[in-house]
Amino acid sequence: MTSIPATSKTCSSGSKTKQKIRVISLFSGCGGMDLGFVGGFEFLGKKYAKTPYQIVWANDFNEAACRTYVRNIGKHVHHGDIWKLIDDMPSEADVVIGGFPCQDISVNGKGAGVDGKRSGLYRAMVEVVSRTKPKVFVAENVKGLLMKHNAKSLERVLTDFKALGYEVTFQLYHAADYGVPQTRERVIIVGTRPGVPKFVPPKPTHTKDTYITARAAIDDLSDVPENEDFNHVWSRANKSAEQGNRKLIAERPGYTIRAECHGNIQFHYELPRRISMREAARFQSFPDNFIFDAKLRETERQVGNAVPPVLAWHVAQAVKGCFK
């Protein structure tokens, strides 16, 4: 039976490294991308080494997500409106990272694109890059940014970053290609300052034949009783006409974990229930000692909004090449 960890501390920004690469994190959420960048965690028996990155300042608007961040990553996260806090952040950084809000771009959104109230927050990231002049910035968003009806939104985002003098590239990543047991596709935009070595995307570590399956990811939790302290709790929502409700296929990776599933998260491939939040966290590649400081519904939101730490770790490894 899976043992429940006694501690939730995953990493610390205060640990000593040979060469610290200072990072500012925006729209940090519970810290999935940040955990991937600093490393020093284990997932499904594989260790992801610590890196030379140090998160020196982070921000999110969601108070509960900030609580989770503090509990697992560090106290350097600042809760509040980024536009009200922007003058308080460090004046310089080596890297700026962030997954700017995607609600207006997502296929489940209202189609407002970057003109929408939430997704328009990418401008805050542009402003931070303009002020701090990092060598590299990394921005994450949903696959919908590449859809035809969002072409103007993508062009505007790229143009605004390029106007700062950065060489900007983007690529669609399939999380399962990097050891995340989930069919999650996300766009990652990387910008490098003139004179900085070009960013070379990380090579996939898995193929369709070697993807981590749903069974491999969560089967050991099948006999573990509900435990709120371990986030092993699940929605009792009945099957409905709303999105979600799919039953996992045991020998395939899990379906994309959504932030706004409203309880309609996918059903277990074998058990007569929906998957638990700990199981959802496994599909997002969070280690078991990463504890979400929230109740079920808010935990659903935090898990679904997160960048998978394992995917972020691979991107972070590739970003190190820009500092050679």
Image (cartoon, rainbow, N blue to C red):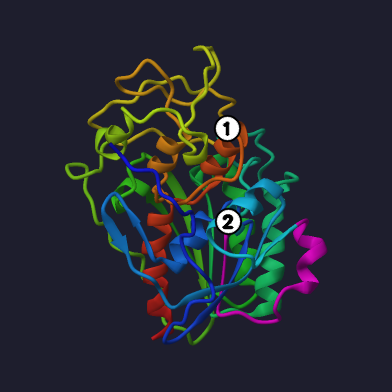
- Between the C-alphas of marks 2 and 1, the distance is 17 Å
Residue 73 locus on image (x, y percent): 54, 62
Residue shown at 64% from the left, 68% from the top = 76
- Residue where numbered disc 2 is placed: 71
Asked if one can make out residue 71 in the rendered structure from this viewpoint, the answer is: yes
Q: Provide the secondary structure element on which disc 1 rests.
A: helix
CA neighbours of label 1 inside 10 A, class few (<14), some (14 to 19), many (20+): some
Residue 202 included in the magenta stretch of the image: no
Q: Amino acid at mark 2?
A: Arg
Residue 171 locus on image (x, y percent): 42, 57
Asked if residue 268 lies left or right of residue 187, the reply is: left
Q: Provide the secondary structure element on which disc 2 rests.
A: helix
- Residue where numbered disc 1 is placed: 296
Residue shown at 71% from the left, 77% from the top = 131
> What's the magenta region?
80-98
Asked if residue 104 lies left or right of residue 185, the reply is: right
Asked if one can make out residue 214 in the rendered structure from this viewpoint, the answer is: no
